[in-house]
Image: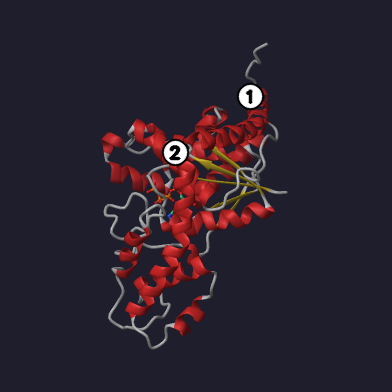
């Protein structure tokens, strides 16, 4: 089976609907056809303002939500990034073949460093994409499903893989990014031209996977729409309604035109009520499963340890080959 790699940052107590629709739902399907690796990238999360006790909690909660959403730790390799030390080790090697200017062109760094300000813009934030390259390359990954905003990082990963292979001899598979379709992108319910995000300034427009279902229903009912009154997909002129249609379609597996037909001639109130039910029906059971897993963290930790061992085996092999190729003296 071809290999697939993806991950998410444990940057909040709960994942949001965009993470679920844009990533988890697709991962769940992809694990049938790929030898899939899904990590909770806690080392990446350290590039944001950090609270140590909270990070531990968020890391477990993120892993529990992967499983609750249908990622099976017996089939896919679901692990915590820091449990496999090779990630940090390969990052160092890759950083020695990454151009300073090349890394400086990453638009996510430019955006984030502007948002964080000089005080919080660290070297770690700058080398974030190099760590991401190490994640992907350690596993001889064939495909990387990502959102459009991560495409540049996967391009850098490809460049680094090719550069290393040419300079030192072939050690890495060159991965291909698979970019998320536009209809898998979810926007903030209160500000439907901005992507729904765990770190949104206000969470009024964020649907949390672990929220009480009634709170999610309320957020749907309050979502921003427009004054036209017709349930119609038009991303440009009707971003709010279009976003709700995308969420509806993604969570039910239905096509957008069929949903438009169902609500033709009915008001937004009816449509939102319908969507609120869909959201509650879908997120409710996921939430229950996640909370049940978190009730018994020892069991969850055992699953994560077993998966980290599986990941380590492959990662260590790649790292040993890289160390050999760059000329590090082997310890006897
Ligand atoms: N709004 C979204 N629509 C579709 N997909 C989304 N993803 C995130 N938001 C949306 C996908 O979820 C995964 C999470 O990646 P991440 O945790 O590394 O960070 P992110 O993409 O920056 O997501 P967030 O939720 O906005 O997190 P923070 O606030 O921590 O930066 C990716 O596969 C992403 O495409």
For label 2, the residue is: 59
Query: Residue at coordinates 28% horizontally, 59% vertically from top-left?
Result: 204
Is 72 situated left or right of 197 in this image?
right
Decide: is 133 above or below 230. Answer: above
Furthest residue in direction bottom, as rendered: 265
The spot of residue 114 in percent (x, y) is: 30, 45
Query: Residue at coordinates 70% horizontally, 49% vertically from top-left?
Result: 2
Q: How is the image coloured?
A: secondary structure
Query: Residue at coordinates 33% horizontally, 42% vertically from top-left?
Result: 113
- The image quadrant that residue 169 belongs to is top right
Residue placed most toward the observer, 52 or 97: 52
The span from disc 1 to disc 2 (Cα, nearest Å) is: 30 Å
Query: Residue at coordinates 38% horizontally, 63% vertically from top-left?
Result: 187
| Quadrant, the C terminus | top right
The spot of residue 305 in percent (x, y) is: 57, 32
For label 1, the residue is: 323
Decide: is 111 above or below 131. Answer: below
Q: Label 1 crowding class (10 Å Cα cut-off): few <14, some 14-19, many 20+?
A: some
Residue placed most toward the observer, 71 or 322: 71
């Amino acid at each position: 089976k071809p290999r697939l790699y993806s991950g998410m940052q444990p940057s909040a107590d709960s994942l949001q609907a965009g993470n679920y629709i844009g990533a988890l739902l697709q991962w769940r399907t992809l694990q049938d056809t790929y030898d899939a690796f899904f990590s909770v990238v806690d080392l990446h999360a350290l590039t944001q303002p950090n609270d140590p006790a909270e990070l531990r909690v968020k890391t477990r909660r993120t892993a529990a939500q992967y499983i609750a959403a249908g990622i099976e730790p017996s089939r896919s390799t679901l692990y915590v990034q820091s449990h496999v030390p090779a990630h940090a080790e390969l990052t160092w090697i890759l950083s020695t073949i990454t151009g300073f200017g090349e890394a400086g062109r990453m638009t996510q760094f430019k955006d984030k460093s502007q948002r964080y300000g000089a005080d919080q813009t660290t070297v770690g934030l700058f080398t974030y994409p190099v760590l991401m390259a190490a994640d992907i390359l350690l596993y001889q990954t064939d495909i990387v499903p990502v959102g459009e905003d991560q495409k540049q990082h996967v391009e850098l990963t490809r460049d680094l893989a090719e550069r290393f292979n040419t300079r030192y001899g072939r050690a890495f598979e060159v991965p291909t990014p698979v970019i998320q379709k536009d209809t898998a992108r979810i926007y903030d319910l209160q500000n439907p031209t901005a992507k729904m995000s765990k770190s949104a300034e206000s969470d009024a427009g964020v649907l949390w996977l672990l929220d009480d279902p009634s709170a999610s229903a309320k957020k749907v009912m309050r979502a921003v729409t427009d004054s036209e009154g017709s349930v119609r997909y038009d991303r440009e002129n009707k971003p709010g309604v279009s976003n709700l249609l995308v969420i509806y379609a993604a969570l039910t597996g239905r096509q957008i035109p069929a949903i438009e037909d169902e609500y033709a001639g009915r008001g937004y109130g009816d449509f939102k009520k319908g969507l609120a039910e869909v959201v509650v029906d879908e997120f409710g059971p996921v939430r229950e499963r996640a909370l049940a897993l978190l009730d018994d963290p020892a069991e969850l930790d055992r699953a994560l340890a077993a998966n980290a061992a599986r990941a380590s085996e492959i990662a260590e092999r790649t790292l040993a080959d890289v160390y050999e190729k760059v000329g590090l003296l082997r310890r006897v």
